[in-house]
Structure formats: structure tokens, C-alpha cells
Image (cartoon, helix red, strand yellow):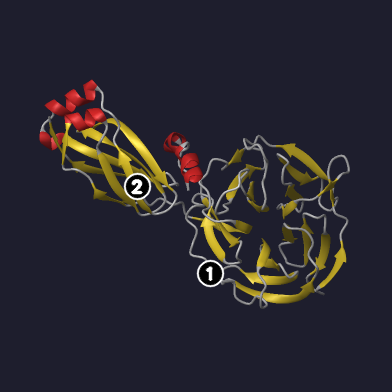
């Protein structure tokens, strides 16, 4: 995926310098084909193996999630055990309109509400399992908002609208009137479809696509600070698939395990002429999505290095850069036991492992 690799490479310097990540937020997500995956906001490129959601009616698949509920493309509302990936149909079924859908509910699962990007708005009584039409959401000037919606902890609604670089937050619970907060997004198109929104703690998590058409389609997870409005995640890491729905499922321990690196092939003897020309190649295999720095080293001193990245576990080929006269001189005079090929591998949670492979330097 050239686009993916290029975008990930731009993050290398920033990720290495970044502070350790905060506690990870875990999610349940639904792929475009209806299968479910789990992931964290730290490592969206490391989703679990897709699994079917049990209990759905024949031919149905989930198009929207909230805590305890799932909405099928048939318009059927299900109660959902996210930990078991098991859905139980309710009697609620409505004809869905539009392409993107949202479902929200109160923590007690007494009342729910279904939205779509067509402007559809339906109240659901989860006790009686009945529905009534809703008034829809309105922007600051009274204009209708056709948005992806989630519920904040205080009961207000939050929303994003494809194409608009803003987060909308309800003025007070139940008013259906939304204030606009502009967001500093780098994308030329804000929140490309398909979109979904989830709330966890002090952050809104926006599932969105790419401004460009990618093959195969992929999704991103943007984290929006509800206090400052700061947006993280535009530069990756990215999902390797397209998702249509997400729901936060709680916090999990940080990913602190360094990736494993295996040297597939590398020379045991390298000439100064090859280093001067930059023709030395090395192949390595990462145990997960990673980025790798490769270069020569004399003892603890590393020479200039090159980098490569991939979004999944697999093999990378790196060609060492051209060495400067000073680097060549240091390698030439160094004792053999102090000359190495140094490989530093990072995963997308910024965990690091260093592998030193002794190499003989000849003229």
C-alpha cells in the first residue's frame, strides 16, 4: 500500500520523540462485511482477527453500535454483548434511510435514538420496544444537521458531519440544538465517509475514511480532545480495512511489548567501497507493524541510518545510505569486534528493540 507506507514514514521522527502513550482505549469495530474486530486507539493497525456476530437475523449485518446496542442494516435493533459478540433481536425495526447511521442510548438502556445522514431521527423506548419520530438536530443557525452522533457523559449529544471540519455539541441535554466548534484538520476534505463517532472519557473518537479513494478502502481513527479541540490521528497509524461502526469498550493496559525483529539476510562482510556507494542491503522481518532504522555502528556510536516501514507483520528490505568520509574512516580503524550493523525497530505504540549484528569491514 504505497499511500499508507508513505504517510507512515512521515511520522517516524515525531513518534520516536513522542512521550509515552496514555492508557489505551479499547474498541469494538465492525468491518464493511459485518464481521467484528477489536483494537485500541494506540494500535489501530493491529486489529484482532475478524469474527462473526452471533444472533443476527439471517442476512443482517451491523451498521451502527453503542454500548449495549447494535443496529442492523435491516433496521432491526439488537441488544449486544460486546464481550461475547452475541446479539439478541428486539421487536424494534424501522425502515432505515441514508447511508451512515448512528444509535445512542442512556446508560440504563431505557431509551435509545437512531439517526441517519438523511436526517432520519427516531426515538426508541427500549422497555416497551416502541418508536416515535424525533425532531432532528439543528445547527447554531437553525439549519438541519445530518450527522453521525454519540452521547456525552452528561447526556448531551455530540456529532460530526462529513465534509465539515467541526465538532457539534448539544447546548443542553434534550434541546437538539448544536453549537459548532471548528477543528484544525489538515485534510482537504473533513471527515470523509464512512463516518462514526464514539465517546470515551474526555475524548471523542471519529471513525472516518480518506479524502483520496484507496484500494482497498481503509479507515482512520481520529481522537478529538473535547476540552481543547485538538485532533490526533490524521497521520496514522491507520486501519488496513474499512470499518463502518465503532464503540469504546473500556481502557486496557498500555502496549509495552517491544516488537520482535529477525534478520532474514545481511552480509557478514562489507567493503568500504560498498558503504561509500550505498549498495549494502539488508532484509528483516517484523513481528507486527513497525518502522525500522538500519545503519552501521562503531561500539555505541551509530552512523547515519535509513528507515522503512510497513503496517503489518512481514519483511522489509533496506539499503544502507552512502557513508561520509568520516564514517568510513571510523569503520576502517575500528577493531573488528566493535563494528556492527545496528537495527532499531519500533512498533506504533513506540516500543523499541535494538538488534546489533557484528559485521566485518574490509577495504
**Label number found at residue 71:** none
- Tell me how many marks there are: 2
- In this view of the protein, can residue 68 be seen by the observer? no
Looking at marks 2 and 1 on the same chain, the residue that comes earlier in the sequence is marked by 1
- Compared across the picture, whether 147 is left or right of 304 comes to right
The tag on residue 316 is 2
Which label belongs to residue 51? 1
Pointer 2 with pointer 1, Cβ within 8 A: no
Identified at 71% across, 52% down, the residue is: 152
In the shown orientation, is residue 157 left or right of residue 320? right
Which of the pair 232/1 is nearer the observer?
Answer: 1
Q: Is residue 141 in view from this perspective?
A: yes
Q: Quadrant of residue 188?
A: top right
Along the viewing direction, whichever of 33 and 94 lies nearer the viewer: 33
Few, some or many C-alpha atoms within 10 Å of disc 2 (few <14, some 14-19, many ≥20)?
some
Residue 43, horizontal then vertical, whole percent: 49, 51
State the residue at coordinates (59%, 49%).
221
Residue 358 appears at what percent x and percent y?
A: 17, 41
Quadrant containing the C terminus in the rendered view: top left
**Residue 266, how many percent across, how many down?**
22, 45
Give how far across and how far down residue 47 sits, in percent: 50, 58
Q: Quadrant of residue 318?
A: top left
- What is the distance, in whole Å, between disc 2 and disc 1 at their CAs? 29 Å
264 above or below 267? below
Frontmost residue, 73 versus 142? 73
Of 133 and 151, nearer the camera is: 133
Q: Please determine whether, in this image, residue 49 is positioned above or below residue 219.
A: below
Q: Secondary structure at mark 1?
A: loop
Query: Secondary structure beneath disc 2?
Result: strand
Amino acid at each position: 500500500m504505497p499511500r499508507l507506507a508513505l504517510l507512515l514514514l512521515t511520522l517516524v521522527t515525531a513518534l520516536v520523540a513522542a512521550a509515552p502513550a496514555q492508557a489505551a482505549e479499547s474498541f469494538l469495530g465492525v468491518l464493511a462485511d459485518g464481521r467484528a474486530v477489536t483494537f485500541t486507539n494506540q494500535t489501530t493497525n493491529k486489529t484482532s482477527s475478524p469474527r462473526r456476530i452471533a444472533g443476527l437475523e439471517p442476512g443482517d449485518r451491523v451498521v451502527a453500535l453503542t454500548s449495549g446496542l447494535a443496529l442492523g442494516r435491516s433496521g432491526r435493533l439488537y441488544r449486544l454483548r460486546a464481550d461475547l459478540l452475541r446479539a439478541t433481536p428486539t421487536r424494534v425495526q424501522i425502515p432505515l434511510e441514508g447511508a451512515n447511521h448512528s444509535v445512542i442510548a442512556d446508560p440504563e438502556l431505557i431509551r435509545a435514538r437512531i439517526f441517519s445522514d438523511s436526517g432520519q431521527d427516531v426515538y426508541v423506548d427500549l422497555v416497551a420496544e416502541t418508536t416515535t419520530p424525533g425532531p432532528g438536530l439543528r445547527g447554531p443557525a437553525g439549519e438541519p444537521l445530518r450527522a453521525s452522533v454519540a452521547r456525552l457523559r452528561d447526556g448531551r449529544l455530540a456529532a460530526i458531519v462529513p465534509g465539515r471540519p467541526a465538532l457539534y455539541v448539544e447546548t443542553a441535554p434534550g434541546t437538539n440544538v448544536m453549537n459548532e466548534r471548528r477543528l484544525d484538520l489538515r485534510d482537504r476534505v473533513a471527515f470523509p465517509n464512512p463516518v462514526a463517532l464514539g465517546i470515551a472519557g474526555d475524548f471523542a473518537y471519529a471513525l472516518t475514511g480518506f479524502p483520496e479513494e484507496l484500494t482497498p478502502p481503509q479507515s482512520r481513527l481520529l481522537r478529538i480532545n473535547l476540552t481543547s479541540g485538538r485532533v490526533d490521528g490524521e497521520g496514522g497509524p491507520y486501519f488496513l480495512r474499512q470499518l463502518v461502526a465503532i464503540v469504546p469498550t473500556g481502557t486496557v493496559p498500555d502496549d509495552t511489548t517491544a516488537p520482535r525483529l529477525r534478520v532474514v539476510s545481511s552480509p557478514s562482510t562489507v567493503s568500504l567501497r560498498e558503504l561509500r556507494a550505498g549498495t549494502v542491503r539488508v532484509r528483516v522481518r517484523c513481528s507486527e507493524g513497525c518502522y525500522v532504522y538500519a545503519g552501521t555502528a562503531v561500539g555505541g556510536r551509530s552512523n547515519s541510518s535509513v528507515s522503512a516501514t510497513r503496517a503489518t507483520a512481514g519483511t522489509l528490505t533496506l539499503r544502507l545510505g552512502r557513508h561520509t568520509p568520516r564514517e568510513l574512516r571510523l569503520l576502517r580503524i575500528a577493531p573488528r569486534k566493535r563494528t556492527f550493523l545496528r537495527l532499531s525497530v519500533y512498533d506504533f505504540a513506540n516500543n523499541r528493540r535494538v538488534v546489533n549484528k557484528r559485521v566485518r569491514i574490509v577495504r
